[in-house]
Amino acid sequence: MMLNMKSAIVNLVAGLVAVAVTGCVERQVVYVPTYRTQPAPAYQPQPAYQYPAQTANPPSPGQVAPASNEPTQQALPAQSPPDSTAVVAQAPPPQQVEVIPVAPGPDYYWAPGYWGWNGGAWIWIGGNWVVRPWHGAVWVGGHWGRHGRGYVWFGGRWR
């Protein structure tokens, strides 16, 4: 019995030594991609970008520019402000609702429209996109304010 026990221990030790020496066998599978040559894509030539026409002459100070949603390249809104010395007896009409188109770029700011006085009647001057004079500039629009027995125009500014 003792001999069987010794023989079992020897076989066990021999098996452990064999496992320790050879280590665990791990099977590793390596996938090798196959490369196929493909013809280079043929690109069609693109037409050159056509820049929009620009006007070189802005309207004269006494003229009112035609209503347009085209952006201006000026640092101030394109509308000519009402005469700041004129005192108008009647109050301006309520502000009109404007549909604001998409900005032409990140440096543009929407200058809203306002009521102007032409000497005998109120006229609406539509808003437009203007280029900011510096990054983050905000246009503080002009307004008609009460002054004595009438209304006067207080001009806008960049802030």
Image (tube, rainbow, N blue to C red):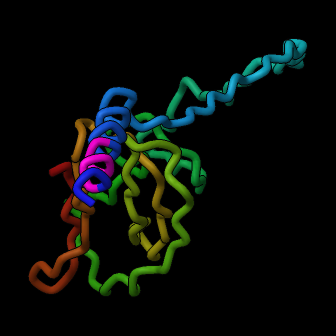
Quadrant including the N terminus: bottom left
Does residue 70 appear to the left or right of 85 in the view shown?
right
Residue that appears at 12% across and 78% down = 147
Does residue 50 appear to the left or right of 148 in the view shown?
right
The one nearer the camera, 31 or 4, is 4
Question: Magenta-highlighted stretch: main secondary structure?
Answer: helix
Residue that appears at 82% across and 20% down = 46
Q: Residue furthest left?
A: 148
Note whether 156 is above or below 29 in the view shown: below
Position of residue 4 measured from the top left corner of the image (x, y, whole percent): 32, 54
The one nearer the camera, 51 or 34, is 34
Residue that appears at 50% across and 36% down = 26
Note whether 80 is above or below 97 in the view shown: above
The one nearer the camera, 5 or 111, is 5
Position of residue 153 measured from the top left corner of the image (x, y, whole percent): 23, 66
Does residue 57 appear to the left or right of 129 in the view shown?
right
Write down the region rendered in magenta: 5-10
Q: How many numbered circles are shown?
A: 0
Rendering quarter of residue 17: top left
Q: Is residue 6 magenta?
A: yes
Position of residue 102 measured from the top left corner of the image (x, y, whole percent): 54, 57
